[in-house]
Structures are given as C-alpha cells and as structure tokens.
C-alpha cells in the first residue's frame, strides 16, 4: 500500500500543543486543515504499525520502522539497540551499551552545492542534517555508545517519552549518540524516542527533518511514541523468537547425528529438511549404527507432530534404538522394545520406524517395519524397486508382533530410507509419491554409464527434486546407503573348539591368511594379539569360539564366544600371573572393543594396513 502523506508537514498547528482542542475563534478553513492533518497522522500510524508488526526477526522489525518513517514522517532516522539485547526477563549484565543498528535517509538527499564531501559518509547516515562543529572536523557517528549512569542520555532514556531536540537535556544527550563533532539541527527538527520493551529500555530512535521541511509539531510526539512502542515490542518479540529458534535448532542438531559413520562395506549420505522455517523442530530422525562383524544398522523414524514435545520423544526413541542396537538384537526385537518404550512415554505417543541391518560379508539385509513407508532399492543396472516388507503397526499401539524379512543386498545397489514427508502431501497420496520416487531414481540412474551407480550425494539432491511447490507439509528425513560389500576373498572365518591347543591353532590360521593376503609384515602383531584374545575366550567358553579376519582399509580381527561378560582393561600388579592380555591389545592395536551379543560377545581389534 502507498505510504500516506506527510503527517506533520502542514503548517498552522501549535507546535507545543499535545492535543490541540477546539478553538471557538478558529476559522473554518484552519479547523478543516487541522482535522485533515490529524486524519493523515492516524492513517500514517496505522500503516506504519502494520509494517513494523510484519517483521519476524530483529532486522525486519528495525527495517520496518525505517521504511515507515522515511520519508513519510522524517527525512532520516537512526535506530540504536542495546548490546547485547536482554532476552525475556533476563537482567542485563555489564555496562549499558547502545549499538547503531540501522540508519536510513532520503536516497536523493545530498550535501549542499559547494560543500566539501565528508569521507565518513557511507550513504546511510544523513550527514547534511548535521553540520560540522566549528572547533573540529566532521567525524563518523560512533557505532557503539556507552550510556553513562547519571548522564544526559541516561536521563532522557529513563523518561521513556519522546522528546524534542530543543529541550536542553536532549541537546546535551544527542552528542553522545551522534558524536561530539556534530552540530545539532536548530529548532524542533529532531525527536529522540526511547525504545522501551516489556521490562526495560532497549534502545533509542532519532528522527530528523531537513531545514526545507516543516518542523515537528506537538502531535508528532504522539506519532513517535506509537512508532517507538510498536518497534520496542517487535524487537522484544523478535529476540524471544530468535532464542526459541536457536533452542529449536540446537535441540534438533543434538538429536540428529552430527556426521554419519563410514563403516566398512557401505557408503552413507543423508538429508534433513524441516517442514518450515517457523517450525524447525519435528519428530523425524535417521541413524546409522555400526555393529559387530562389519554390519551396520540403518534406522529412520517419524514421531507424530512438529512440536518440541515431538522432538523430545524422538530423542528418547532414538537413544533407545541406539542402546538396543548395541545389544545386537534382531530388528523385530528392537521394534518391540521401542513399542514398549513409547507406551511408557504416554498413551498418545505414536511413531513409525523402519529398522534394517546390513551385512557386507553375506550381502544380505534384514528389515523390520513399524508402519513406515517401504524402502526403495536402486539396483546397479538402473532398475528401482519398492521392497516388499511387512507394513506392521506404528510404535506405541502396543500388543503388536513385528516381522522381519531377509533380502539380497547386492554390491552396487543403493537403499533409500525416508519419512512420509518426502512422498506424501496435500496434493498426492503416499503411494503416488512412492511411485514418483521410484521413477525419479530410475531416471537419475539413466544419467550415468550402464552398470555404474550414480554418485550418492547428488542422488540425494535429485530425490528431493520430486517435491513441488506446496509439497513441504511435513519434515523430511532421508538416509541413503550404497552397498559396497566385502568380497569373500577378503574374509577368513573359522570355528575353533575351546581347548588348550586353540590359541596355537588360531596363530597358525591367522599367519596363513596374512601370507595369502601378502600382509606378512603384520604377522608378529596379529599372532600376539590373536593369541591373547583367543586365550581369554578359551578360558571361559563352553561352545566353539569363532575367529574372523577382515581385510579392508584396515585389518580387523574378531573373536566371538558364548560368555556375555565383557572384558575390562585393568592394570595388572607385578605379582599377577595374568591380566596383561588386553593391555597388550590396547597398546598395539589402533582400535579395539567388545560388544555383547544375544549369543555371547565379540572382542575385536584393528590394525592399520602396512
């Protein structure tokens, strides 16, 4: 809407009057002119406050004040805000500092002809309104001002009400804002308006008019007060919103993985898109959790809603899923325990989840579903298919038996796990969206050479292109896994009976495998560590133990037994006969660990490749 006419440009009103009353001796033309100016002021205040109220963040609010004031109300404006701005009921600490947040002036207003250009004029500050002081050169307006307690500026701000620049206290206070080298315009061509929020003064606005324009009138103080009040409340709102948005972002960031792991035999990529900038927290999550034996658990889930409560529930379910994955439970058991956890959180805590475990050695994947959209697999030849997995009931329903299916995961294939925000919107149902996703994957695969899978990161970006205008009704979590697998030639696996001779047998088998892989430089270290770990397993195991070597970018050794107790590193005393095995493993291996399984445990260590 066009800005209304200048609310204070007309002559004839008493500049000292706050509310000029009806004068019996007033001429009809003068009365009509006064009423017209009053109506202009009301229309201006209405338009200006609406423009200020449209601002959501701090910059938009301050910009709204500047754009509404110039040129309709003043020829220039300077807006100062407290630094730092207090949030809510926080009590400010430290000195009272004001920072010049924004200035605005008429774009076509230049210095008078023949005047020497001021090098400090950046095009934002209305320099011609302020002339150089006789005793010194012109300098730029200070950006940061400390408000001295008991000083003139502090006194004016404490008064809260807008004040004309010809008031003695204001004339003493303005040099603190504008710089001591500035001359203050004569007459009522300056209004200093404190900005008071809900609790305290948070800034100040300075309105200035040129000499060729009518000076401010008494009613203009009321206009300045309205502008200052709405701006201060808008700034308060923007600061609170900014704090909430920051908390929401931090909450979401801490509940999603900072970066995906890079387990052996699989390449991962992910995307997360909130439903809207004003609702940055939701219940969607994804995760990739390394498991013993080079396996990896792939998880994607969706809690109902987009609130902080949904995000908190999501965080609890994600933590529970990570804990259950650490126990190496089957996927259907993980979903069963997640369902129990959701019921403990509340009767209305509903979520969908898909949990898959990929084995790069067996080239197989086990999938269990709890009411989530089915995954889509893009094969190496460019064919995309929607995997047939049991739908299952959502988490939180209770009393539901979840099923798991085992499927082939050939090398070069790409598995896409996603939430329903990617495929469902007000314009399309979920199955139509899934079909569009499948077609998009097929088309993208056709852009690369035959039997060459498309790069994973660009593939994720291409997938998000199926979202059209208005399709962002829900959060979107996307997890893509490229199955590389581990060739059988890089795996050595044995079952060993728990006997006294087993450690010697394990050393011999490990040495032969290293000779076959041309890794004899690692023989001494591997034989020593294998002997120590196998000896510990033989001491307590009752069933055959397993020994497996994996050759990838590192050499990984895994020893499994049927004893659930995990070994702990301890410092052996000089008189102890044992207790030094894990100490050697800790000193010689690059990494090591122990993981409890449903059938016992696995102790593993890794050595760097020569």
Image (spheres, rainbow, N blue to C red):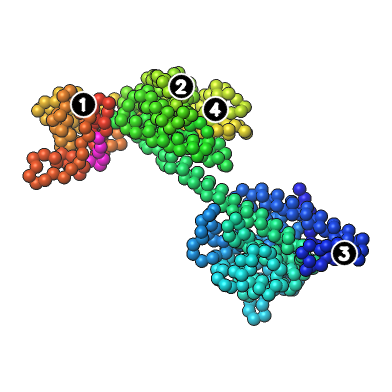
Determine the residue positioned at 85% across, 57% down: 36
- Label disc, if present, on residue 482 of the rendered structure: none
Q: Earlier in the sequence, mark 4 or mark 1?
A: 4
User: Quick one: label 4, few (<14), some, or many (20+) residues within 10 Å?
Assistant: many
Question: How far apart are the alpha carbons under marks 1 and 2?
Answer: 34 Å
| Residue 111 position within the rendered picture, expressed as x and y whole percent measured from the top left | 72, 69
Question: How far apart are the alpha carbons under marks 2 and 4?
Answer: 19 Å
Determine the residue positioned at 45% across, 31% down: 346
Q: Are marks 2 and 3 in contact (CB under 8 Å)?
A: no
Q: Earlier in the sequence, mark 1 or mark 3?
A: 3
Q: Earlier in the sequence, mark 2 or mark 4?
A: 2
User: Quick one: label 2, few (<14), some, or many (20+) residues within 10 Å?
Assistant: many
| Residue 545 position within the rendered picture, expressed as x and y whole percent measured from the top left | 19, 26
Q: Which residue is mark 1?
A: 562
Determine the residue positioned at 54% across, 27% down: 423
Determine the residue positioned at 42% across, 30% down: 342
Element assignment for label 2? loop
Q: Nearer the viewer, mark 1 or mark 3?
A: 3
Question: How far apart are the alpha carbons under marks 2 and 3?
Answer: 80 Å
| Residue 257 position within the rendered picture, expressed as x and y whole percent measured from the top left | 42, 39
Q: Which residue is mark 3?
A: 23
Q: Nearer the viewer, mark 4 or mark 1?
A: 1
Most foreground residue, 473 or 445: 473
Q: Earlier in the sequence, mark 4 or mark 3?
A: 3
Q: Is residue 161 visible?
A: yes
Q: Earlier in the sequence, mark 1 or mark 2?
A: 2
Q: Which residue is mark 4?
A: 423
Query: Does the segment drawn in magenta span residue 593?
Result: yes
Range of magenta residues? 588-594
Quadrant of image for the C terminus = top left
Q: Which residue is mark 2?
A: 393
């Amino acid at each position: 809407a066009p800005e209304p006419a200048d609310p204070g440009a007309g002559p004839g009103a008493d500049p000292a009057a706050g509310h000029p009353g009806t004068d019996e001796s007033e001429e009809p033309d003068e009365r009509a002119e006064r009423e017209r100016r009053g109506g202009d002021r009301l229309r201006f205040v209405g338009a200006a406050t609406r423009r200020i109220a449209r601002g959501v963040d701090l910059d938009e609010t301050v910009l709204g004040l500047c754009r509404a004031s110039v040129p309709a109300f003043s020829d220039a404006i300077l807006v100062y805000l407290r630094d730092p701005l207090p949030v809510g009921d926080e009590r400010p600490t430290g000195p009272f500092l004001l920072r010049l947040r924004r200035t605005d002036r008429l774009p076509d207003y230049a210095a008078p002809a023949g005047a020497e250009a001021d090098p400090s004029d950046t095009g934002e500050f209305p320099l011609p309104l302020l002339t150089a002081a006789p005793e010194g050169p012109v300098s730029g307006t200070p950006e940061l001002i400390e408000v001295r307690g008991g000083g003139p500026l502090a006194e004016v701000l404490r008064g809260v009400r807008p004040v004309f620049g010809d008031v003695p206290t204001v004339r003493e206070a303005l040099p603190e804002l504008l710089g001591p080298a500035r001359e203050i315009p004569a007459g009522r061509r300056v209004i200093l308006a404190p900005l008071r929020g809900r609790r305290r003064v948070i800034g100040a606005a300075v309105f200035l008019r040129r000499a060729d324009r009518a000076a401010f009138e008494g009613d203009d103080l009321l206009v300045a007060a309205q502008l200052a009040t709405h701006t201060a409340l808008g700034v308060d709102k923007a600061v609170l919103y900014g704090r909430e948005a920051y908390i929401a972002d931090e909450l979401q960031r801490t509940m999603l993985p900072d970066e995906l792991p890079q387990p052996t035999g699989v390449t991962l990529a992910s995307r997360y898109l909130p439903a809207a900038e004003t609702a940055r927290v939701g219940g969607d999550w994804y995760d990739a959790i390394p498991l013993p034996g080079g396996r990896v658990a792939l998880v994607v889930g969706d809690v109902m809603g987009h609130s902080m409560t949904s995000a908190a529930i999501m965080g609890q379910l994600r933590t529970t899923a990570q804990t259950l994955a650490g126990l190496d439970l089957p996927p259907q058991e993980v979903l069963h325990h997640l369902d129990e956890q959701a019921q403990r959180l509340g009767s209305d805590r509903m979520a969908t989840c898909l949990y898959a475990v990929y084995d790069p050695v067996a080239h197989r994947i086990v999938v269990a579903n709890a009411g989530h959209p089915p995954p889509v697999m893009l094969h190496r030849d460019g064919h995309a298919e929607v995997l047939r997995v049991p739908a299952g009931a959502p988490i939180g329903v209770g009393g539901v038996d979840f099923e798991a299916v085992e499927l082939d995961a050939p090398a070069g294939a790409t598995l896409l796990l996603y939430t329903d925000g990617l495929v469902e919107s007000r314009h399309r149902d979920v199955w139509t969206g899934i079909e569009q996703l499948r077609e998009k994957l097929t088309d993208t695969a056709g852009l690369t050479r035959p039997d060459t899978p498309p790069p994973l990161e660009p593939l994720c970006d291409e997938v998000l292109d199926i979202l059209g205008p208005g399709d962002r009704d829900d959060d979107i979590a996307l997890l893509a896994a490229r199955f590389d697998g581990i060739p059988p030639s890089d795996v050595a696996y044995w079952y060993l009976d728990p006997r006294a001779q087993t450690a010697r047998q394990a050393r011999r088998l490990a040495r032969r495998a290293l000779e076959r892989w041309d890794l004899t430089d690692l023989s001494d270290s591997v034989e020593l560590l294998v002997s120590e770990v196998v000896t510990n397993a033989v001491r307590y195991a009752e069933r055959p133990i397993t020994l497996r070597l994996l050759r990838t970018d590192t050499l990984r050794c895994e020893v499994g037994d049927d004893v659930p107790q995990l070994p702990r590193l301890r410092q052996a005393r000089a008189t102890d006969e044992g207790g030094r095995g894990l100490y050697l493993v800790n000193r010689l291996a690059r990494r090591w660990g122990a993981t409890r399984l449903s059938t016992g445990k696995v102790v593993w260590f890794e050595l760097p490749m020569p």
